[in-house]
Image: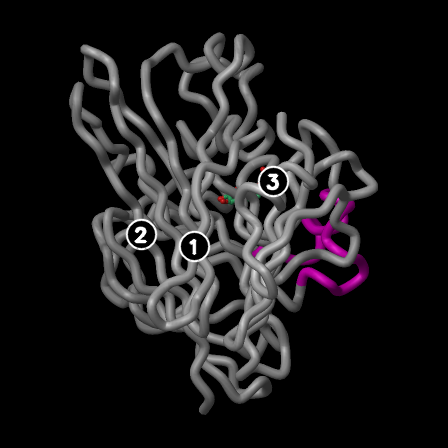
Amino acid sequence: MKTAAQLNQQFGIAGQLSFRDDASGLVVAEFINKFATASLCLQGAHLISWHPRSQSKPVVWVSRDAKMAAGKSIRGGAPVCWPWFGAHASESSFPGHGYARTVPWSVIESGTEPNGATRLTLRLQESEKTRAQWNHDCNVDLTVIIGDTLRMEMTTENTGTSDFVIGEALHTYLQISDIGKVSVTGLEGCEYWDKVGGSNLRKQDGAITFNGEVDRVYINSAAECVIHDAPLKRRIHIKKSGSLSTVVWTPWTEKANKMGDMGQPDGWREMVCVESVNAIDNVVTVLAGNKHTLIVEYTATSL
Ligand code: BG6
């Protein structure tokens, strides 16, 4: 694995992108440009923060109790869930949401976009441990582009000779004023699997508002979602392609208390997850020799 010093030499961009060794032993990429600041942990290719200069508050939320540690996911940011979403279909000892978010990724490219945004591409590193859970020949690459818009592209390339099926998500935690004061539009009329109190198929009636735990997998929709946040005087737009499921999640008090890293007593109230996903009805078959790409763009606009 490369050190921060080696990465700075090979991929650093003066005044825009640098790498540092964190006290946890993990390496973190720091972005700063005319549009935004952001950081990303190389383990998990896990975006930790994104704060456009146009916004008084960050747009991506990270828990004040988030911990960085080898082999552990960070609470907040944009965890990468791959090659399955939620619990593994048959092996209960395999990690929830797959292993991609807890294993090392390598930097393979960096650059500056024509408009001045900063780009970084990472590739998941296979190991004996990952092979034991997923024994297929493939490349998994994540590109993040840090600008006034945050763009994330995840490509799964099947380099083998047989087809495989994946579930996946960019499980982004978005910063809001208060969960009781926001709504999410874009999924009106959509069917969803309601994971609270069993697993029931329901239909969304109107905008989504929150007054208790919400854990829903909306299916068969690539619609743009918008978080309306009147107290923060902004909307967050989530536009995607290559993703037909959207997960909307807030743990609420009881679950947040049990989780222990949500920034108690009320840190969890300042986040909502609107995740760009392929799960359940929408898992993806990647044919031998083919690629599949999930792209998400996040933009905050003022009210
Ligand atoms: C969401 C799931 O995507 O992630 C929830 O729908 C889950 O059921 C949440 O609780 C957080 O998962 P984790 O594994 O990061 O604690």
For the C terminus, give its image quadrant.
Answer: bottom left
Q: In which quarter of the image is residue 156?
A: top left
Vertical side of 91 occupied by 297: above or below: below
- Which amino acid, by three-letter code, is at mark 3? Leu
| Badge nearest the viewer, 3 or 2 | 3
Q: Residue at x 35, y 52 (%)?
A: 246
Task: Measure the C-alpha gap from mark 2 to mark 1.
Answer: 18 Å
For the residue labelled by badge 2, is the local secondary structure a helix, a strand or a loop? strand
Q: Which residue is drawn at 72% across and 53% down?
A: 262
First of labels 1, 3 by sequence position: 3
Residue 302 in picture, x, y percent from top left = 46, 88
Mark 3: few, some, or many residues within 10 Å (few <14, many ≥20)? some
* Residue 261 forms part of the magenta stretch: yes
Give the residue type at disc 1. Answer: Gly
From the top left corner, tell me how far across and down residue 213 is, in percent: 57, 55
| Span shown in magenta | 250-268
The answer to which of marks 3 and 2 sits earlier in the sequence is: 3
Tell me the residue that label 3 is attached to: 7
In depth, the one of 141 and 69 nearer the eye is 141
> Of the residues tagged 2 and 1, which is closer to the observer?
1
Which numbered circle lies on residue 246?
none
Q: Mark 1 points at which residue?
A: 111
Residue 86 vs 79, above or below: the answer is above
Q: Residue 57 occupies which quadrant of the picture?
A: bottom right
Decide if residue 251 is in sight here: no
